[in-house]
Image (cartoon, helix red, strand yellow):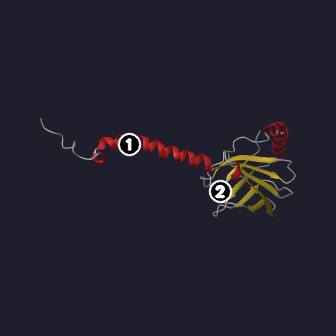
Amino acid sequence: MEKDPMENQPWYKHYHVWLLILFPAAAVIGGINMLFQAIKTDDGLVSDDYYKEGQEINSQIHRDTKAAALGLSGQLMLGEDGQSVRIQLNKAVKDDLILKLMHPTRAGQDQTVILSKQAPQFYAGKLKNALTQPRWQVELSDTTLQWRLKAEWKISDAEALALTPVL
């Protein structure tokens, strides 16, 4: 009977040993990665004032119907630098505008900017931080909070975002 040439080799030269070590090692590395991600990121999905926000829903609906009654709509454009934003409305309004960009899951990345009037229907402003995430909830309103326009923005689209009243 012939001896197997692998029998006399050290343990680390047997591929079966490495195959047995591979799966537990991958699980440990994956677990460490998941722990790091859990510590590093903030999970801001639930609002602290959810009850108060629920009670304010009627005022939000009133702002949407007011924008529809005024016949307001507009387009939002992002500059090449990722920070400058421009709005063109279909009708002139008196005040400056408030633009809120809200990330669907990361509240720490939300931004609010005041847009100043550049021309009768044209407004511009600059964000504090460039938009790095691809999806945003956009809300545009006047400074007196009488009306609002909303939309969901996918920045990967190179087109301008249409802002319309939500009914």
Q: Quadrant of residue 48?
A: top right
Q: What quarter of the picture does the N terminus occupy? A: top left
Judging depth in this view, the residue of 30 and 150 nearest the camera is 30
Which element is circle 2 on? loop
Apparent side of residue 133 relative to residue 164 in the rendered image (left or right) = left
Measured as percent of width and height from the top left, residue 138 is found at 72, 49
Q: What quarter of the picture does the C terminus occupy? A: top right
Disc 1/disc 2 C-alpha distance (Å): 43 Å
- Nearer the camera: disc 1 or disc 2: 1
Apparent side of residue 64 relative to residue 15 in the rendered image (left or right) = right
- In this view, the residue farthest toward the top is 1
Looking at the rendered structure, the kind of residue marked 2 is Leu
Name the residue carrying label 1. 21
Measured as percent of width and height from the top left, residue 65 is found at 82, 41
Which element is circle 1 on? helix
Name the residue carrying label 2. 131
- In this view, the residue farthest toward the left is 1
Above or below, comparing residue 124 to residue 59 in the picture? below
Looking at the rendered structure, the kind of residue marked 1 is Ile
Measured as percent of width and height from the top left, residue 68 is found at 81, 43
Residue at (60%, 46%) from the top-left corner?
38
Q: Is disc 1 surrounded by few (<14), some (14 to 19) or many (20+) residues within 10 Å?
A: few
Residue at (48%, 46%) from the top-left corner?
29
Residue at (28%, 44%) from the top-left corner?
14
